[in-house]
Image (cartoon, helix red, strand yellow):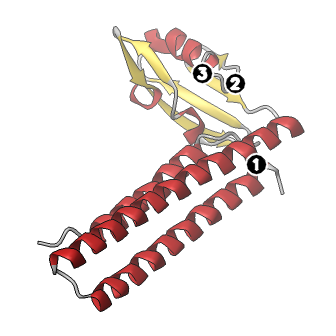
Amino acid sequence: MAAYDKADLERRMAGAVEALKHDLGGLRTGRASTALLDPVTVEVYGSHMPLNQVATVSAPEPRMLSVQVWDKSNIGPVEKAIRSAGLGLNPINDGNTLRLPIPDLTEERRKELAKLAGQYAEKARIAARNVRRDGMDSLKTDEKKGVFSEDERKRHETEVQKLTDSTIADIDAAAAGKEKEILGQ
């Protein structure tokens, strides 16, 4: 069995793009996005749970998030968790739900977030390049073992490079779209 596995490389590169999209989803733009609260964990029932396991998060308006807590006794801990998550959000507790107005971003904050989006993209590019390197190394190993001829190895290397190029193009497109959204263009 050959060590080179194209499907595995494709899966790992797709994983780098998905991880980037998840990271970018957590960045706050001027608009309400339910993904904004994904990193929030709440201490309830003696353990830390993701917010989406104790409440329903929705975006009823472009600049407002609504958090409907399932068990009313957990409204306090949920409100505390959102306030302490470092997202710059101040929940308004109306007894049954928490309303989260999304404040305008300052120009300085927009630039910081755009820079952070760029850092996330670079991390994803590095991950894609590492997958490419692993693929190239396994091709060379397989050629030495006699699994591939030199021509076959070169053909597979071209495939791996094309996969890498298209993955990096996807990463760049996702990052550029998010930066544009953050900068409000």
Mark 3 or mark 1: whose residue is earlier in sequence: 3
Task: Indicate the position of residue 180 as horizontal and vertical percent values.
Answer: 76, 57
* Residue closer to the observer: 36 or 53: 36
Residue located beneath label 2 in the image: 89
Task: Indicate the position of residue 78 as horizontal and vertical percent values.
Answer: 52, 17
Q: Amino acid at mark 1?
A: Ile
Q: Are marks 3 and 1 in contact (CB under 8 Å)?
A: no
Residue located beneath label 1 in the image: 182
Q: Mark 2 falls on what kind of element?
A: loop
Number of residue marks: 3
Q: Mark 3 falls on what kind of element?
A: loop
**Which quadrant holds residue 172?**
bottom right
Q: Amino acid at mark 3?
A: Ala
User: Could you tell me which residue is drawn at 23 percent across and 88 percent down?
Assistant: 149
Q: Which mark is residue 163?
A: none
Query: In the figure, is residue 77 to the left or right of 113?
Result: left
For the residues labelled 1 and 2, the Cα–Cα distance comes to 17 Å
Q: Is residue 129 above or below residue 91?
A: below
User: Could you tell me which residue is drawn at 76 percent across and 48 percent down?
Assistant: 182
Mark 1 or mark 2: whose residue is earlier in sequence: 2
Q: Amino acid at mark 2?
A: Leu
Residue located beneath label 3 in the image: 85
* Residue closer to the observer: 131 or 91: 131
For the residues labelled 2 and 3, the Cα–Cα distance comes to 9 Å
Task: Indicate the position of residue 28 as horizontal and vertical percent values.
Answer: 69, 39
Q: Are marks 2 and 3 in contact (CB under 8 Å)?
A: yes
Task: Indicate the position of residue 114 as horizontal and vertical percent values.
Answer: 74, 47
Q: Most extreme residue toward the right, as rendered? A: 107
Mark 2 vs mark 3: give the one in front.
Answer: 3
**Which quadrant holds residue 94?**
top right
For the residues labelled 3 and 1, the Cα–Cα distance comes to 20 Å
Q: Quadrant of the N terminus?
A: bottom left
